[in-house]
Every structure is written in C-alpha cells, then in structure tokens.
Image (cartoon, rainbow, N blue to C red):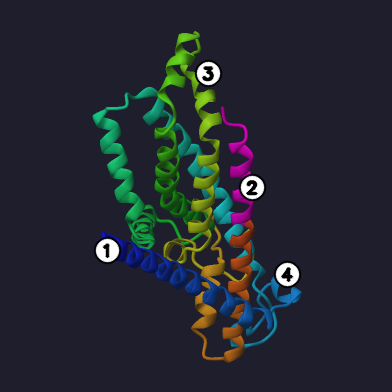
C-alpha cells in the first residue's frame, strides 16, 4: 500500500511540474512579446505601409502583412470548409461505421496532418513552377488550404464519430432523407466545426514556411490574386533577420499584433463553441 501511495504522490508531483513548466513557457513567451513589442508599437506602424528604408529603421509600418494574412487565412479557411464538411458527412453519414475505405481515408488524413508545412510549401512551389505560376496571393491561398484541410477533417471527424448513431437510425425511421439527416448531424457537430475552424485559423495565420515559397513578399497590399502578398510571420522573420535593433523591435511589434489576433480568435472560438453546445440535442 505504501508503494502505491508513493507512486500516486510522484505522479501528482510530475503532473504539477509539467503543468507549471508549460504555463511558465507560455507566460514567458507572451511576456517577452508584450514587453518588447508594446514599447515600440504605434498606430502609424499598424495602419501604414512600409516606407523607403523601412527594413533599416526608417518610416513606415506593416499594414501590408496584416492585410495579406487576413486575405490568405480568410480565403483558405472558406475553401477548406467547403471541402472538409462534405468529406466528414460522407465518412460518418453515408459510409458504415466499419467501412474499410473510411479507415484508410482517416489514416491518410492523419499522415497529412503530421506533414510539416515546409513540405506543403515545397510541393506547391514545384507544382507552381510546372504550371508556370509566379509567387502570388493565389499561391499562398491554395497551399494554406491544402495545409489546413487535414486539420479541419480530422478535428471535425473526431467529433462526428462520437455522434450517437441512434439519432441517425431514428431520423431514418421517421422518414427523413439523408440530406435532412445531415442537418441533424450538423447541429450536433457544430461545436466541433467551430473548434476545427479555430485550430485551422491558428495554424494558417502563424505559418511562414509554406507561404514563403508560394505567396512571396511585397511591401504593398495585393489588389489581385496574381500579385505577391506579405504575411505577418514572414514580416517578423525578415525584420528579426536585420542587424538593426530598431528593426528587430518592430518584429516584436508585429509579433504582438499577431498574438493579439490569435487571442481574439481563440476567445471568439470559445464563445461560439459554448454557444452552440447549449443548443445540442
């Protein structure tokens, strides 16, 4: 008995140390970003484009990176949902629970989920060269869509698999069509859709490797899909690479904006998930 008691205490201590370590790392990252970014950020920096010599410490801001990130994330999330939601319905409503095809499909999406974003970027870059495309906003949108589709599908699919199969049978027994039954399923997995969307947005807006190869970089706001586009992660990367301390501080200002955007998205996602959870059957 004493040995089991000691093991239980040791596991509790290990869990507490792990929790405090993770919390300390997150708090340290956030404090560093806010401490270094808040002192140099300004409204002019947020709402103005890079001026001449911006990357050597002269005037201007990173509005181009903010707008470029919003364009890429919004478009890729929309396209990703258009592809992912029908796939999830097909796997969980149209196929049987023990379907071998569904098993293979889930395994494939698990593999795609774990592939590093730079591999997606290299693949998309090779494809763009073969098609004769230049780095552009369209390229960034397409590669980011490919990046987040596995996240959307597997996150929503995990929720859909816990959907009570009795509700499906009851819906069919009442004479509902598959399309009408999909509406019942949609209502039940809406919190999962909101969570999956949140995860995909967080992955998309913070990725630099994939869009570096496909979206390129520009100091102006793109007005068409064929023009290159800047993103906040790339802006941070390029500014931190500069030798000037002032330019490096601007990178922390851009990181502060990115952190605040992610925080807003996280809180919104929590609210939406909580709101839809109240409406579940």
Please identify, in this view, whether the residue under mark 2 or under mark 3 is nearer the observer: 2
Say what secondary structure mark 1 lies in: helix
| Front position in the image: 15 or 127 | 15
Give the percent coordinates (x, y) of residue 115. Answer: 32, 56
Query: Does 123 lie within the magenta span?
Result: no
Disc 2 versus disc 4: distance between alpha carbons?
Answer: 28 Å
Q: Which mark is nearer the camera, 1 or 3?
A: 1
Is residue 81 placed above or below 260 in the rendered structure? above
Name the secondary structure under disc 2: helix
The residue at which mark 3 appears reads as 180
Q: Earlier in the sequence, mark 2 or mark 3?
A: 3
Mark with earlier residue (1, 3) = 1
Q: CA distance from mark 1 to mark 3?
A: 58 Å
Q: Who's the residue at 41% across and 71% down the image?
A: 17
- Quick one: 128 or 42, which is closer to the camera? 42
Q: CA distance from mark 3 to mark 4?
A: 47 Å
What span is colored magenta in the figure? 265-281
- Position of residue 61 measured from the top left corner of the image (x, y, whole percent): 67, 75
Q: Residues within 10 Å of mark 4 (few under 14, many from 20)?
A: some
Can you say whether 77 is above or below 277 in the image? below
Residue 271 — which label?
2
Query: Which of the labelled discs sits on residue 2, or is there none?
Result: 1
Write down the residue under mark 4. Answer: 47
Which image quadrant is residue 57 in?
bottom right
Which of disc 4 and disc 3 is earlier in sequence? 4
């Amino acid at each position: 008995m004493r040995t089991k008691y000691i093991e239980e205490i040791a596991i509790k201590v290990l869990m507490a140390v792990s929790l405090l370590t993770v919390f300390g790392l997150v708090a340290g990252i956030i404090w560093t970003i806010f401490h270094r970014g808040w002192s140099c950020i300004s409204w002019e920096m947020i709402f103005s484009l890079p001026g001449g010599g911006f990357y050597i410490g002269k005037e201007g801001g990173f509005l181009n990176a903010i707008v470029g990130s919003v364009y890429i994330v919004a478009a890729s999330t929309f396209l990703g949902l258009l592809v992912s939601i029908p796939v999830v319905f097909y796997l969980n409503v149209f196929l049987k629970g023990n379907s071998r095809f569904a098993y293979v499909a889930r395994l494939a999406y698990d593999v795609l989920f774990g592939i590093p974003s730079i591999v997606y970027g290299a693949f998309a870059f090779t494809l763009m060269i073969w098609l004769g495309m230049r780095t552009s906003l369209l390229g960034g949108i397409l590669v980011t869509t490919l990046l987040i589709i596995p996240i959307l599908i597997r996150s929503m699919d995990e929720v859909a698999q816990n959907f009570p199969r009795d509700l499906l049978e009851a819906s069919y027994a009442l004479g509902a069509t598959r399309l009408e039954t999909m509406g019942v399923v949609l209502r039940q997995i809406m919190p999962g859709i909101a969570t999956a969307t949140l995860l995909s947005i967080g992955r998309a807006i913070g990725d630099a490797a994939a869009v570096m190869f496909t979206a390129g970089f520009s100091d102006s706001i793109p007005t068409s899909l064929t023009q290159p586009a800047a993103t906040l992660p790339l802006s941070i990367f390029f500014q931190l690479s500069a030798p000037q301390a002032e330019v490096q501080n601007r990178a922390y200002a851009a990181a502060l904006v990115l952190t605040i955007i992610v925080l807003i998205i996280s809180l919104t996602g929590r609210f939406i998930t909580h709101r839809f959870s109240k409406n579940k059957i």
